[in-house]
Amino acid sequence: MVANMTLDELVTSAASHLMGVTATTFRGVCDELLRQLVEHFDVDLSFLRRNDHVAGTTTLIAEWPHRPFVPQPDPLGIVSFTGADRTFAATEQPGAVMITHPDGTDDDYQDTVREGSGLPGFVSSATVPMLSNDGTMGVLGFIKFGDRDWGDAEINALRAVAALLTQVEARVAAEERLLSMAYHDELTGLANRRALIDHLTERMRVGATGPVALIFLDVDRLKALNSVLGHVSGDQYLKTLAHRLSAVSAGHLLARLGGDEFVLVLDECAGRSLAGAIAENLRRVAVEPVLLGGEEVSRGVSIGIALGTPGTLTASRLMGRADQAMLLSKARGGNAITFFTAEMRRQSEIRTDIELHLGTAIRTGALVLHYQPEIDLVSGRILGFEALVRWPHPTQGLLQPNEFIEIAEATNLAGELGRWVVESACHQLKNWHAKYPQHALGISVNVSPAQLITLDFVSTVAQILDECALDGRYLTLEITEHALLRDTEQALATLRGLKEIGVNIAIDDFGTGYSSLAQLKALPVDKLKIDRGFVRDLGVNADDLAIVTSIVGLSRSFGLQLVAEGVETTLAATTLLDLGCTRAQGFLFAKPLTAQDADWTLEREAARPSAAQHTR
C-alpha cells in the first residue's frame, strides 16, 4: 500500500511514474501520482497548478480526487494574481513551501476553496513551488479539511516530488509548443492545413452529425499588394485579416492553408442559410480597409461554400468542392460568394474522369483528328487542312479540345498530346501527298503555350518531319497571342528554331490578344488568322469591317499571309475577297471532317474541272 511506503520509496515511485511521460499521457500520470500522494499523506485533496507570468494567472491543470461538481465559472480554475487572496497571490513567486492553517489569517482563501469544492469547513494547506531557471513554473499543493502539521521530512519529500514535476513540466511544455507549431500557422496563429484536415476528417466520418459546412476564402489580387508595398506589408495585411475573420467566426475552426487562402469549418450542423450568412460576415469584415505604411488598403475576397454529409465525402473532396466554388467566384470578378451546386459536381466528376483517363487515351490512340479545309476564295479549291484533335470518350461523347487541353497542361500531358497531334497530322498529310500530288496540300496544327516553352519541342517537330519524309514548308504551327505572354524569351527561341527547320508559323485568333506592331516585327511569323468573332457578321457589322480592314492592311505591311476563320455566309466571303483576303475556313465551306470524309472531299475535287470556281 502507498500509505506504508517510506518517504524515499514514495519519491522513487514518483520518479518511476514520471520517467516516460509525454504531453499526451501527462494528465493521466499526474492523476495517478496525485492519488498516491493523497493516500500517503492522508490529505483530502492534491492539485497541480501552472503559472503564466505573461498573462499573470495560475491555472489548475490536475487534481485528485476530481470534484463531482465544478461550478461555472470555476473559482479554482484560472485565478489572476492581481486581486487574488493573499495565499493565491503568493503562489506567483513563492520563496519557499507555504503552509496555511485555519486560523483566520486568510479567510478569503478559505472562502475560495469552499466555493470551488462545495464542501463546508476550514482547511489547512501545503503549497510547494516548482522552481526553474525562469522562475516559478507552478505549484504542487495539498488540502486537508481541518488542521494538519507538516514535518520537515515530509516537506523535503514534497520538494523532491515538485522538482521531478518541474522537469516533466518543462519537457511537456516544450512538446506542447512543438505540437502547437505543427498544428498552427506561424504567421497568423490560426490552425494550419494539418490541423484542418484532422478536424475535417473527424467531422466527415461515418456516423458523425451533419451536414458539415465548409467556407473557402481567397484574397483577391494580393500579389499586386505585395508588389507595390512589399511582402512585409502583405504579411501584416494577412495577420490583420486573420484577426478579423477570427472575431466573426468564434466557436468554429478557422485555418490558413498558406498564401492568401483561409478555410472555415462550421462547428454545428449548418444549412445553406446559416453558411451563407456567416460567409457574408466574413466578406464584410474582409473588405474593410487596412492601414499599411500610412496607406489604407482594401481587398475583396472570393468565397466558395460546400455542404457535405458525413460518411459520403472525404475531407479532401469537400475542400475540393468549396475550392471549385471559390474559383467560380474569382472568375466572376471576385469579392463574391458562390455555393457548390449539383451542376458543378457533375463538371467536377467529368473533369476527374478526364484527368484519370486522358494519358491512357493518348498512349492507346483513342484520340482522333478532324480536318477543317482551308479554301482559296478565288478558285474554291482546298489549300490545306487544320488538324483538330477530338476525343471520342466512352461515356462523355465526342469531347472538343477546350474540354481537355487545359487538363492536359495541368497534368503535364501537353507535350505528349502535342507530339501525338503533330505526328498524326504529318503522317496523314504524307498520305495525301502520295495520293493527290497535284494539290501540294499543307497542314496546320495548334500549339499550346506549354508546348511553346518546352525546350525539346523544336527537336521533336524536326524528328517527326524526318520520320514522315515531309518538307517543313507544308507544316504550319498555330500559336495564340496569349501564348507569347507566358515566357516571351523561350517562346521566341522556339519560334526561331522552328523557322530554321522550315516550319511556318501562324498567329491564331488574331485581334483578340496583345500583339503590338513591335512584336509582329520581331516575331518570325508567316501567317495571321483573323479571329472568327470578327468574321461571323462581316458585311453586316461596321465595327467588324473596320477591324478586318485594319488586319488586312497590317498583313500586307508585314508581308504576311492572311486566313479568315469562321466564314459562315456568302456575304462574309465576298466581303473578304473585296478586302483582299483570299484564304478562309468556315462552315460555309465545310465543318471539320473525319480523315475519311476529307479523303472523299479531295477525291471529288480531283475529279473537278481545272477551271477556277469563283465564290461570287
Image (cartoon, rainbow, N blue to C red):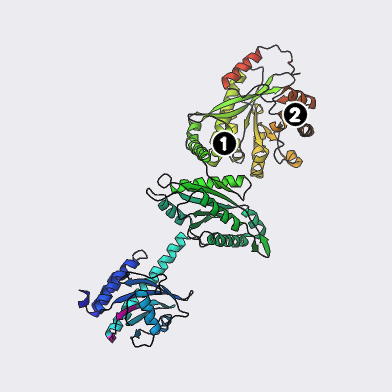
Q: Which mark is residue 538?
A: 2
Left or right relative to 201: residue 233: right
Left or right relative to 598: residue 313: left
Give SS at disc 2: loop
The kind of residue tagged 1 is Ile
The kind of residue tagged 2 is Leu
| CA neighbours of label 2 inside 10 A, class few (<14), some (14 to 19), many (20+) | many
Q: In what quadrant of the picture does the N terminus appear? A: bottom left
Left or right relative to 172: residue 519: right
Q: Which residue corresponds to the image point at 49% horizontal and 31% vertical from the top-left?
A: 361
When the figure is inspected, residue 29 is found, relative to residue 112, above or below; the finding is: above
Residue 510, position as x, y percentages in the image: 70, 35
Give whichever of 608, 136 is nearer the camera.
Answer: 136
| CA neighbours of label 1 inside 10 A, class few (<14), some (14 to 19), many (20+) | some
When the figure is inspected, residue 353 is found, relative to residue 227, above or below; the finding is: above
Residue 560, position as x, y percentages in the image: 74, 31
Mark 2–mark 1 CB contact (< 8 Å): no
Q: Is residue 19 visible?
A: no
Give SS at disc 1: helix
151 drawn magenta: yes
Q: Is residue 239 visible?
A: yes
609 drawn magenta: no
When the figure is inspected, residue 455 is found, relative to residue 376, above or below; the finding is: below
The residue singled out by tag 1 in the image is 405
Q: CA distance from mark 2 to mark 1?
A: 30 Å
Residue 284, position as x, y percentages in the image: 60, 56
Give whichever of 216, 123 is nearer the camera.
Answer: 123
Residue 327, position as x, y percentages in the image: 57, 46
Q: Nearer the viewer, mark 2 or mark 1?
A: 2
Rendering quarter of residue 485: top right
What segment carries the magenta color?
141-152
